[in-house]
Image (cartoon, rainbow, N blue to C red):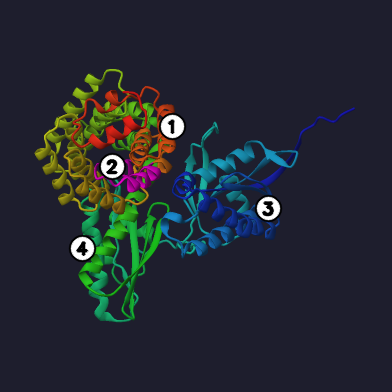
Amino acid sequence: MTDNRVERRLAAILAADVAGYSRLTGLDEEGTHARLRERLRGLADPKISEHRGKVVKHTGDGVLAEFGSVVDAVRCAIEVQRGMAEQNATMPQVKRIEFRIGIHVGDIIVDDNDIFGDGVNIAARLEGIAEPGGVCISDDAQRQLRGKVDFAFEDMGPQNLKNIVEPMRAWRLRMNASGSPAAPIEPPVESTQALALPDKPSIAVLPFQNMSGDPEQEYFADGMVEEITTALSRFKWLFVIARNSSFTFKGKAVDVKEVGRRLGVRYVLEGSVRKASGKVRITGQLVDAVTGAHIWADRFERDMADVFALQDEVTVAVVSAIQPKLFQTEIAMATRRRPENLTAYDLFLRAMQQFYLSTREGLAEAIRLAHRALQLDPQFGFVTALAGVCHMQRVLYGYAVDPQFDRKEAVRLMRLALSIDDSDPDTLAFAAIISAYMVGDCEREIEMANRAVALNPNSFLAWSSRGHVFRIAGLPEEAIRSFERAIRASPVDPRLHLMFVGMGMAFIELRRFDEAIVAGKKAQRQNPSFPPASFCLASAFAHLGRDGEAREAAARLLETDPAFTISARMGRRRQSHLKLLIEGLRKAGLPE
């Protein structure tokens, strides 16, 4: 008689995967795969064995492992994250592979060298809410660790985990930039009343530590902080603590959580400056002051030539790194909030997440969420402009059921947004794009785009808007320069495919077809289902007489956009800036 009983046992389960794996493979598929395989086989797998664990399987971009002891599992996780941090130290930010790790103790089902059950599912869900480079554990795991380890844990409270019925309490292991567990936090001797957090992302830039051993260099470190504070202040969606308040912490050993509590901010940026032998090295790290989690860390090294030019250069580098990261962190938090607790700003963040998808369904959902936000806050100018851009894109991408309605609605919302706030650089940027595609008043559109970049020269959106406006105005060289500035301002932005397509179309009008192909392929890697990347490639290949590749790009375009015709997609646009693009599409055999 066959024994059909399922084998079960209690185990500590470790689930790890790579944060932002799709973005990394989009940038460099083969290189990312090779680096991940090296990290799994050379670091994660040996550490699991060393801590008496068993690798159950590799999961494409991660690993699932089983341990007999949660203490072993957590110690292994720390060793892996420390090793990852060390290997990432010499890697450019955009190429870094960072693990997120989740650990749970629970009952598992064992079947043919694999494991299943809620215990495995919970570990995987905890991994999903861990910070890149961090470790998140369940309350069950934390209870078994008490008194056995010296690590500092942060209580994340009840978490709503996907496909897990009841909210589960979770704990975050505090890690510092080196990948080591942070020391336990001592309660402050003196305590003041904590300030309430503002209703938008809030940040304080602390004085950078002068590591040069030369008191004369204090001016450089202080100047750097002032420049960064000023640059961040130009983002109206950010609440930035003034320099005078931040500098009250100068020269003091600070607890970031206490700083956040006393200044009433969610995020704290801290760093150091070291000058020696004609060079300067600046390190910075962005910390969630509520949880103590490290969100971002990097270092910059430059030759010490013109001090003020150097400050400007490093300021741009720091702001372009942390501003997009901070915004993505806010979006991630908004998606985890319960629907009944959503504010207008939460709804805006959710709308932006859908807008980034550039799909028919994504734009429809972004419009719905934007209107819900406006019901709560009718004076939210930027979300009004966002809804207008979504209606515009439905026309441009052929998603509109009633193009005339979407066209009119885009223009109506543009005008409403400007009446609410015509001094916000992001609102101006969106308004300029809508006007360029839907109205056609070159002088006004160029004026709005130039005002947007003047108000915030570090804004991805302002520079990208300027690129589209100048391209449509028939000034492709200036458009390309603007797109390049946008990419510099946000080098890992989810909208980079729009920049590369804009550059590709501008290159075509300049007859720089080889460069158009490079840009089109970059856009396709960023967003494989984005139709404009394919028609950019089809046109450029056709102009070069590479007919086979042109037909292949045209076929891919028709797969992603079966209703595509040249007249439908290009016919309603001002065509002076599209002459060579359209000529190439015809050569590629695309339907009129």
- Position of 461 compared to 330: left or right? left
The image shows residue 416, relative to residue 301, as above or below, that is: above
Mark 2–mark 4 Cα distance, whole angstroms, equals 50 Å
Indicate the amino acid at tag 4. Asn
- Residue located beneath label 3 in the image: 69
- Which of marks 3 and 2 precedes in the sequence? 3
The reply, left or right, for residue 522 in relation to residue 482 is: right
Q: CA distance from mark 3 to mark 1?
A: 51 Å
Residue pointed to by mark 1? 556
Q: Is residue 79 magenta?
A: no
Mark before the other along the chain sequence, 1 or 4: 4
**What count of labels does the image hold?**
4
> Hey, what amino acid is under mark 1?
Arg
Query: Is residue 99 among the parts visible in the rendering?
Result: no
Q: Earlier in the sequence, mark 4 or mark 3?
A: 3
Element type at mark 1: helix
Q: Give the residues in magenta.
A: 498-523
Q: Which mark is residue 244?
A: 4
Mark 2 Cα shell of 10 Å, populated few (<14), some (14-19), many (≥20): many
Q: Give residue 361's position: percent from left, percent from top.
A: 38, 26
- Under tag 4, what secondary structure? helix
Q: Choose top left, top right, bottom left or bottom right for residue 292.
A: bottom left
Residue most toward the right?
Answer: 1
**Helix, strand or loop for the magenta stretch, by majority:** helix
**Any part of residue 262 in sight:** yes
Between 316 and 48, the residue placed more toward the observer is 316
Q: Where's residue 95, x and y in %?
A: 45, 55
Query: Who is closer to the viewer here, 179 or 375?
Result: 179
Q: Nearer the viewer, mark 3 or mark 1?
A: 1
